[in-house]
């Protein structure tokens, strides 16, 4: 029921950027929602939150808490309206303190380190999008996490749901 999110830049081509917004479940470490665009408008973060709500199904994100930094996208009336619509309580860190959103910041750093592998940028937007999609798929379905007992986020959620049903 606790999620974090952030926006990070993806360097492509000759000085251009794509932007990635993520929504990570803190309990399972699953990247429940994400969006990539060539802009940083509020639509980027609302698309990511809508994607997370769709992944979560019927109850969506109702009753959850979403933590972010104080970026203008997250502070916008449009994002606040969407959170109200989805039943999400917003939480924002202190201004200028990235440590308040360490889980999201760490995810972004890991994604870039593992997809760029020492390069400074992707050759094209298409290459960047494909690399991010592959990484997120692997992260959710195969990457083991010590905090989850060395299983991947999707398997952790499956086991948690099975235990809840059995109880």
Image (cartoon, grey):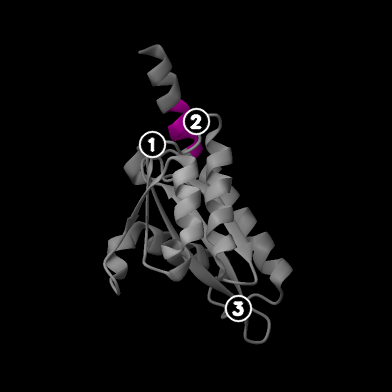
Q: Residues within 10 Å of mark 1 (few under 14, many from 20)?
A: few
Q: Earlier in the sequence, mark 3 or mark 2?
A: 2
Q: Residue at position x 39%, y 64% from top?
A: 105
Residue ID for mark 2: 59
- Residue 114 lies within the magenta run: no
As drawn, is 71 to the left or to the right of 56?
A: left
User: Can you give x and y, in whole percent of width and height, for residue 110 in the image?
Assistant: 45, 63
In the displayed orientation, state which residue is furthest to the top: 166
Placement of 122 over or under 146, stated as above or below? below
Report if residue 138 is visible in the image.
no
Nearest the eye: 124 or 34: 34
The answer to which quarter of the image holds residue 135 is: bottom right
Nearest the eye: 110 or 1: 1
**How far is mark 1 from mark 2, CA to CA?**
9 Å
Report if residue 52 is visible in the image.
yes
Q: Residue at position x 42%, y 16% from top?
A: 165
Element carrying mark 1:
loop
Residue ID for mark 3: 121
Give the prevailing secondary structure in the magenta stretch: helix
Element carrying mark 3:
loop
Quarter that holds the C terminus: top left
User: Can you give x and y, in whole percent of width and height, for residue 159 in the image?
Assistant: 44, 26
**How far is mark 1 from mark 3, CA to CA?**
39 Å
User: Can you give x and y, in whole percent of width and height, for residue 115 in the image?
Assistant: 57, 65
User: Can you give x and y, in whole percent of width and height, for residue 92 in the image?
Assistant: 32, 60
Element carrying mark 2:
loop
Residue ID for mark 1: 63
Placement of 159 over or under 8, stated as above or below? above
Quarter that holds the N terminus: top left
Q: Residue at position x 53%, y 45% from top?
A: 52
Q: Residue at position x 43%, y 38% from top?
A: 151
Tag 1 near tag 2, CB within 8 Å: yes
């Amino acid at each position: 029921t606790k999620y974090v999110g952030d926006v990070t830049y993806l360097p492509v081509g000759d000085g251009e950027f794509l932007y990635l917004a993520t929504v990570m479940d803190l309990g399972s470490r699953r990247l429940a929602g994400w969006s990539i665009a060539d802009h940083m408008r509020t639509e980027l973060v609302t698309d990511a939150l809508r994607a997370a709500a769709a992944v979560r199904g019927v109850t969506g994100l109702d009753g959850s808490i979403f933590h972010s930094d104080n970026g203008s996208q997250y502070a916008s009336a449009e994002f606040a309206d969407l959170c109200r619509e989805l039943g999400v309580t917003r939480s924002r860190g202190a201004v200028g303190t990235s440590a308040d959103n360490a889980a999201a910041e760490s995810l972004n750093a890991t994604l870039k380190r593992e997809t760029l592998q020492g390069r400074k940028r992707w050759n094209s937007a298409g290459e960047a999008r494909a690399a991010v999609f592959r990484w997120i798929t692997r992260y959710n379905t195969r990457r083991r996490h010590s905090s989850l007992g060395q299983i991947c986020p999707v398997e952790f959620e499956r086991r948690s749901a099975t235990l809840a049903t059995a109880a």
